[in-house]
Image (spheres, rainbow, N blue to C red):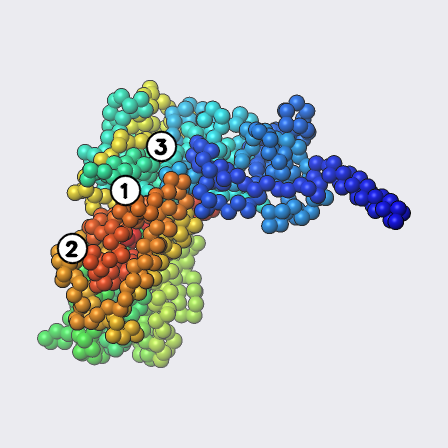
Amino acid sequence: MERTTSTWGVYILALSFSLAFTACGPVNRFTRVKRIPREYAMNYCGTDIKASRSIWSGKAPWVVFSDQLDNFSYRKPTGKNVYKELKFMEPYLVIKEKGDWLKVVKYCPDIIKDGKLVNRKQAQYYGWINKSDLLLTQSSITDLATGLKNKMVTVLADSTVIAVPDKYFKNDSIRVFQDTDFMQDYKKVAMHTIVYPLKESDNGDKTLIAIKSYISPDSVATETLGWIDNALIRNIGQQLHVDINTLPSDRILFKDRYEMDTVTYGKESLQESEVLEHNEKALLYSPIVSFKHSNSFSSFRTGAFFPLTDYRNSYILNVDGNPITYKQFKGIEKQLKQINILFVMEDDNEVARQYPGIINVIQGLQSRFSHPQSEFTYKFGAVLPTKGHVGNHVETIALTSDYMELLNALSDRVDTANKLSRNSTNHNWKSLRKAINMLENHKNETNVIILIGETGSGSEWAETALVNKLADYNCRLLGFQLHSGRPDKYTNFVLQVENMIDSYAKQIAVSKREKIVYADQLRTMNEYNEVKRNIYCLDFPNRSMTQGWVVFPSKDESMPFEGLTSSVDSLIKQVENDNRLVASSLRKAFTETGNFRNRIDSTFIQFHRMNKPSTELITHSLKSVSPLYFIPAQTVQIPDSLSSSVDYKLLLSDAEFKKLKNFISLLAGFYVDYKYDKNQQKGHKNQICGCPDDVWLLKNITTTERMDSIFNNEYASTRSVRRKLRKLYYKNINTGKVHRLKRREMKQLSLADAHHLIITCPTDNQFLKSYKIAELKRRKELSDETLDMLIDYFKEKKKKLEQAAGNTFKSNGQTYYWISRDMLP
């Protein structure tokens, strides 16, 4: 018995020595990775406020990063004995906290799983690091009021930059550094792009920035940009923006940086900045950094982007040695953005027979021109044969910017096309001549003619007068032959179209030289490229200076409409790229070549109270970039009576867009049906549109009238829908927010106020303003019919938002969306 007791004592003693030995190392079996504290989970702006428990999981490991090059760790939390040198943005796992010191191990994905150390033997111990030397969070700075991430853009925000530009710029980009002393370069970031602030320097004049709002330790090297001077970044709030040109001019006031004297500016300066911003779409609209509505007024702080350089006294020389003034350049640039497209149908048998198919193709092209953020403005028209008293005539559909107007006009003529006389004689390009004459007042714009026919006239050559007009009116021609027969008139269609293209291409190449400033854009020939079998186009830009297409079938065959669709799309892309290249080349030439005649913008000088500085240094550092600067406006106050004319926008990241889309999808996902048959489709329902003033005509209907069943059909119970809808609002109003509203406060919010808190964009919808969340509960305040129409309204907005999914732009490799107010409920 004594031996057994002694043996157990030995075992216990040995085990104790073993545990004591293994517990002596800095990383041992008792080491645990700390969870990220609530005060560092969201990185709230300028505070250590704890994140709401609803968004703090409490399970994520605490990952920190060395915020500068040449930081050091120490053996003990005293800062006396250096242990290791730290690399910039090297990630670490926190295993212990003691006051202002953190005990860390180097982050490695192999040593951690589900927030726990799984391979402690491979963990590299790094000692103690002071919190001041670390980025203590993976999140960018978060706005305290909205719970949304603050965005910034890289623009000139201070006058110090132009005095020593080499300190801040290199190769047309902004320098960012590994340290706050700006001794070690790290990366470069382009001007006019979106970044996210992670941390400010101790003196508040520099910011650590990233391309994402949340950085991962596994990809921190690509997601973090480095330290940047605050003179080169500007806060643009979270999401809400405004088109400053839609604000009444008497409501906008700029004062100098000392808030003393009024700064004068011209509308042309804002318009000029718009032109420069087309390639920097992050700056299309003015940011709103604070917004408040009270006493029938909306008050907000915004500002404007202006071009730093005044080019008005500048000029450049084209390839023929002729001067192009800046005023002329602005006119050319404006003209290049206007593209007119005419669909021209000749009086041929196949045109009449296949008219419905042609209209279907034109309808399918609508999405090609439905991008609201496009830098180009399109107008559309048509020329087609129509039935007359004696034979056939040519009818025109005037140019319009409304594509649906064109489609409706073409569709109305389907019956007329079926009654056209079958023409067996050779025509004389009547429709084409009519189309060219329509363009007489648009000769300085770009005119695209889609010519659809079957036969040509009696010659292989096009008429000289016709060709000259095509060139004089700056036309691009696509000839599409529907059917090819054996007689020569079918061959003549192809030969004459090709001759037209060859002839106008030579003339356009000569006139285009007046707009070209770089010799490498000149071509001495106009050669064709075979895209596919029987589809040819001028080889732009490799062996031609302009565009032209001819598409035809083999003998005794018809050309499928797929060839028309793809050819039109390709031609429009070529035209857009051509115009874009000409405009950007001129702009680049003014930036590079004409800089000795340039001046610093007078508004910039007034705002910063400067003497007239030279542009020489800044233009040397930014040779091919036209920098913009930002100046804040005084508080703008808009009465509710003018609010509907203000064009608000949302700037959303990909994650923010998905969140918005999910919320509106949930709103639109409810369904209200009739009691008598839930599967019967409702007919004769009141139709709605998206206009705030027109949608809700129910505001003029009494409560009693609204409670009546429509067409004597009684609604099924809506209790569940009403409950879920209120619950959806309650949940989303407080999502991500520190200062959460109580349930009784949310009940008293109007639907408009609830949407503003959730979506961040104000609404002028009077119906949404007139109903409170609490009133969703009772039929007495909100009838079933009105509830049904409300949900239909949400469904319409969902469709509009889905259309915006394709209108994206990239900034620093990330996807962003501009969302108009009319897309939102």
Other residues around mark 2 within 10 Å, as few (<14) / some (14–19) / many (≥20): few
Q: Position of residue 64 (x, y in %)?
A: 57, 37
Instruction: Tell me, for residue 699, which label it has, or none.
Output: 2
Q: What's under tag 2, amino acid-wise?
A: Lys
Dot 1 crowding, Cα within 10 Å, few <14, some 14–19, many 20+:
some
Label 2 to label 1: alpha-carbon separation:
30 Å
The dot on residue 424 is none
**Which one is in front in this view, the residue at disc 2 or the one at disc 1?**
2
Nearer to the camera, 199 or 594: 199
Foreground disc of the pair 3, 1: 1
Residue 75 sits in quarter: top right
Q: Earlier in the sequence, mark 2 or mark 3?
A: 3
Circle on res. 243: 1
Q: What separation in Å lies between label 2 and label 3 (alpha carbons)? A: 46 Å
Q: Indicate the secondary structure of the residue bearing disc 1.
A: loop
Residue under pointer 3? 629
Residue 324 drawn at (x, y percent)? 30, 38
Q: CA distance from mark 3 to mark 1?
A: 17 Å
In this rendering, would 687 be left or right of 48?
left
Q: Quadrant of residue 702?
A: bottom left
User: Is 67 located above or below residue 563 in the figure?
Assistant: above
Sequence-first tag of 3 and 1:
1
Residue 674 seen in the figure: yes
**Which residue is located at x 66 percent, y 28 percent?**
76
> What amino acid is found at the position of numbered circle 3 in the picture?
Tyr
Q: Which element is circle 3 on?
A: strand
The answer to which image quadrant residue 393 occupies is: bottom left
